[in-house]
Amino acid sequence: MAETTPPAAPPAPPASEAPKPKPVVPFSPVILKHIHEPNAHTLEHYLARGGYETARKHVGETDPASLVAIVKDSGLRGRGGAGFPTGMKWGFLAKGTGKPAYLAVNGDESEPGTFKDRHILEKDPHQLLEGVILTCWAIQSNHAFIYLRGEFILGYQRLEAAVKEARAKGFIGEKSFGKDFPLKVTVVRGAGAYICGEETGMLSSIEGGRGYPKIKPPFPAVSGLFKCPTIVNNVETIANVTHIVKNGADWHKQWGTEKSPGYKIFCLAGAVKKPGVYEVPLGITMREFIDVYGGGMVEGRTLKAVIPGGLSAPLLTPEMVDKCTLDYESLAGLGSMLGSGGITVLHDGVDMMSAIYNTMRFYHHESCGQCTPCREGTGWLEKLAHKHHAGHAHAGDTDLLADVAKNMRGRTICVLADAAAMPMQSYLQLFRPEFDKRVAAPEYVEKGRTARDEITPAAKRESVTHGAPGVLDVGMGMDRV
Amino acid sequence: MAKMPAKTLSSEALRQFHDWVDEYPNKRSMLMMVLRLVEEEFGCIDDDAMEIAADLCGVNVAHVQGMVTFYTHFKRPAHGKHRFMVCATLMCALDGNTDQALAQIRAKLGLKPGEATPDGLFSCEKVECLADCDKPPVIQKDDEHFCSMKGPALDAYIDKLLTAEGKTSEQYLAATPVTMDLRVAVLPVHYNFEGEQNVGARRFDDKDPYFAPGEGSENGSARTTGVPPALKTPLTAPVAGGALNPSNAGHGANGTSGGQHG
Ligand SMILES: Cc1cc2nc3c(=O)[nH]c(=O)nc-3n(C[C@H](O)[C@H](O)[C@H](O)COP(=O)(O)O)c2cc1C
Ligand code: SF4
């Protein structure tokens, strides 16, 4: 057992001994370290930087339970959205059922504003694969599925090539690393459905059906893929496993906060100078992230709101942004969520009615339609948001929005309904005056105008369509105020 | 009783299928990948392709129709040969990025989202987040992925495609575009209503010659590579009858009624 304990002196980074008071440890990217190097996706590149050594060391040698213990110790939390402790999830895997256990890696990455898994899949697929091998050994599964969204074409090609290379090298196969551990890794492609990012929806899709989520419980860890015990984890979560097993739990806990240890990849989009993916220690301030990593707001614009964790996350106003740090607890405290780490910055010119209408259109389009509150509710939210956007909402419509949103929550098979209602509720809470302004006042109606015309004259609206009049009818309805 | 020749898969595609058989716990779970296989093989998923996929995976054709109408990324016959998918979700739509891309496509090809050119060469649609939100607008053209695709880059790309097809922008601007119809027929065209044994998808089990040992298998076990002799005959049951009357075509969502006549 002695050699299974994490190495005492982690090789990287050259920092003072853990555990010291935080946050003094300098951080350099771990998972994204090599993505800017050409050929980082090839096996040679990965082997040259010590790739597959950790898996070789542990597969067939180390007690699987001790690997689960390391991950549990490290405090790693799921990076797919819910932030559930990964080690604990692995511990829930039903044992002794006589059925095979599966690992299903969630590479659907459908949450708008998130684009981190794309970089791992396209630029460093072997890193993910080593994590898959270690995870499979830890949970004693002989078959892993990696589900990619259908739009990831390069990602699929690279991952598929990586699987073939690893198979040819004997890292996966009948005898992985020459040990008595048969392992299959199967890559499945989705085909453009957000709901296949939901874990049970993804399992339905892998099973060869529509991506319909299933009632929980039973949770996948008890009865998942093919009614067998299944662990579902996000691509980034699994990519973390290699580094944690290699460097130890304490190494991981050097960064981050007490309850959100480690580092995470955040995706920055919207009105900042340098949008992109950044891997940062958890617990840094949102301001630092936007101003230092993102280079600050684009010229001539000020911050209006931030969507902190993918489109489903409730908004933050500038005052909340000042108080916010990038960890699960801080965002939960502000009534929002860290989610998948997709941060979108909205500038002062964004018309919030356009934004909410666009958002609701997304959820209405992506609802799988199994549950009435979700199927009908998202439709109602879209219609009512459209009425506000177009400026012909009636007096009670804003309250109706609030009512529909409230009644969608907690009544459905999966949380897509909540994911749609949450942003609506936060827009209503934070930007209620903008809704009210769009309610058609009698004097506008008399003049044959809408409330929207009063706020944004039609001529100005068309200017954002870059000289192609009429496109707004079919466009996103995004206009500037 | 004119027999309709059904399409067949090439031997490479079948070999790929047979390689996959060992990878999956059951045939139904191969469906997502098999649909990709037939999509690549025939260029899009039409009725024949759905029938073949149902055959290969041992499921009802109606089930495959349900899949194809649920997942929006599969290419259907109504889509253009060059299929433009423009991300319309908030991150791309902010600041009019999506609008600009759509306007450019419209100015070049005369297409609004949901439309195709009458010759079926180009089509345009809005899709949801393509996961590259830091470089809007994001556009996918079939298997190609483009970031920050607006302005001169987009114009030049469309021009390149137009030249390759020997078409001009003016031709398309003068023509009336067609609205894409992505519905599936209630039953695939090759359905035989006369012989009951042919109604519904052909069901394969492991005793089926399809999965029997092939010529090239060394250990005699089923499901190895090499095309089994049975596959030299067409996969789909050749059946009588013409194409389904288009007026019978129903909405995809309601199309699950097919296949259970037995
Ligand atoms: C509507 C919806 C969409 C989701 N989309 C994704 C996704 O695209 N990628 C992902 O990893 N998790 C997604 N999730 C979260 C998964 O259900 C699941 O919690 C996650 O994959 C578990 O992995 P983790 O513990 O590593 O985070 C989604 C959840 C919901 C409700
Ligand atoms: S909540 Fe919506 S997406 Fe989720 S299962 Fe129900 S209908 Fe489908």
Image (cartoon, coloured by chain):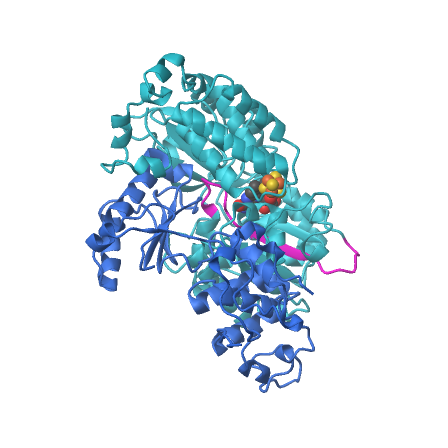
Chain colours: A cyan, B blue
Q: Position of residue A359 (x, y in %)?
A: 46, 34
Q: Position of residue A88 (x, y in %)?
A: 69, 43
Q: Position of residue B186 (x, y in %)?
A: 55, 58
Q: Residue at x 30, y 44 (%)?
A: B101
Q: Position of residue B116 (x, y in %)?
A: 34, 53
Indicate whether residue B72 is drawn in magenta: no
Location of residue A275 by image quarter: top left
Q: Quadrant of ligand 1?
A: top right
Location of residue A145 by image quarter: bottom right
The quadrant in which the N terminus of chain A is found is bottom right
Secondary structure mostly seen in magenta is loop
The answer, for residue A135, to whether it is visible in the render is: no
Which residue range is magenta in the image? A95-116
The quadrant in which the C terminus of chain A is found is top left
Indicate whether residue A97 is drawn in magenta: yes
Eyeballing the image, is A263 above or below A125?
above
The residue lying toward the viewer, choosing from B254 and A98, is B254
The residue lying toward the viewer, choosing from B127 and A350, is B127
The answer, for residue B112, to whether it is visible in the render is: yes
Q: Residue at x 44, y 46 (%)?
A: B131
Q: Viewed as shown, does residue A129 lie left or right of A348?
A: right
Number of numbered discs visible in the structure rendering: 0
Location of residue B99 by image quarter: top left
